[in-house]
Amino acid sequence: MSQVPLRVLLEAAEAVAKVAADAAVAWFKADIIVETKTDGSPVTLADRAAETAARTWIEQRFPDDGIVGEEFGETRPQAARRWFVDPIDGTKSFVRGVPLWGSLVGIVEGDTVLAGAVCCPAVDETVAAARGEGAWWNGARCRVSDTASLDLATVLVTDERAYGDATKRDAWRRLADAAQIARSWGDCYGYVLVATGRADAMVDPKMNPWDAAAVLPVIEEAGGVFTDFSGARTAFGGDVIATNAALAVAARQVMGAGGPR
């Protein structure tokens, strides 16, 4: 595998996310059949079309790399570099005509995330980042907020029911009760809001690798902290807390989580 500059990978992640988003948005607000996968989550022709478009782009330009996609699984699992693709993050919002969804791409080498991007075409926002290259929001540098007190914070969650896990639901409620504003502007758009300083924390009780691998570099390169509920930095799914740096310890303590490490 040839060495590719991180700046090039940043641009590639953003390009693939936009390719997937362009394919998906063609179906947005259309009359589309929704199927239910074995895990109970919805899937549509738009999800499959978007992932196919992303895979085609990657295969043409990085033919030796592996691809891990939500809809079509994994190709070349032994490849040194892999692309994680979620063609539509927030399908439940997508099928109801709610614009807070996006296409996610993360580029990983071994256990190291090199670059990631989130494209939310229905609100015309894209955030992309690469290790050491900063985070970029519609082409301009972006940073997390400086909010340092939870009673002034805006905190977000995808679904406050925590998918039936009472412990995680209670942890979220403690954070929500401590904050000034608690909203469910969730899925990938919540992380875009944190990375651009418009929200201060985002919580997910369950996240897949094709989500986390894209979002981790976006949050970290914007100056934030991205960990699981135990405080461990993670790019491969599970429960997640993303915060600005100033609230990293306080938010996790209120939730009963370990401090970031």
Image (cartoon, helix red, strand yellow):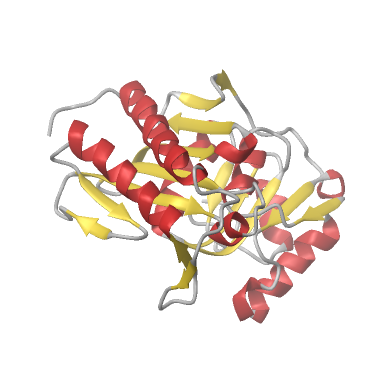
Residue found at x 27% / y 36%: 57
**Is residue 151 shown left or right of residue 30?**
right
Residue 233 can be seen, yes or no: no
**Is residue 137 shown left or right of residue 58?**
right
Tell me residue 38's x, y (percent).
40, 78
Q: Quadrant of residue 223?
A: top right
Residue 155 can be seen, yes or no: yes
- For the view shown, which residue lies furthest in the top direction? 140
Residue found at x 78% / y 37%: 147
Residue placed most toward the observer, 4 or 73: 73
Q: Quadrant of residue 47?
A: bottom left
Indicate whether 122 appears above or below 201: above
Indicate whether 167 appears above or below 210: below
Tell me residue 72's x, y (percent).
29, 60
Residue placed most toward the observer, 63 or 148: 63
Residue found at x 49% / y 56%: 232
Residue placed most toward the observer, 42 or 202: 42
How many numbered discs sit on the rendered protein?
A: 0
Tell me residue 142's x, y (percent).
61, 26
Locate the N terminus by quadrant: top left
Residue found at x 51% / y 43%: 25
**Is residue 59 shown left or right of residue 53?**
left
**Is residue 47 shown left or right of residue 153?**
left
Tell me residue 172's x, y (percent).
71, 65
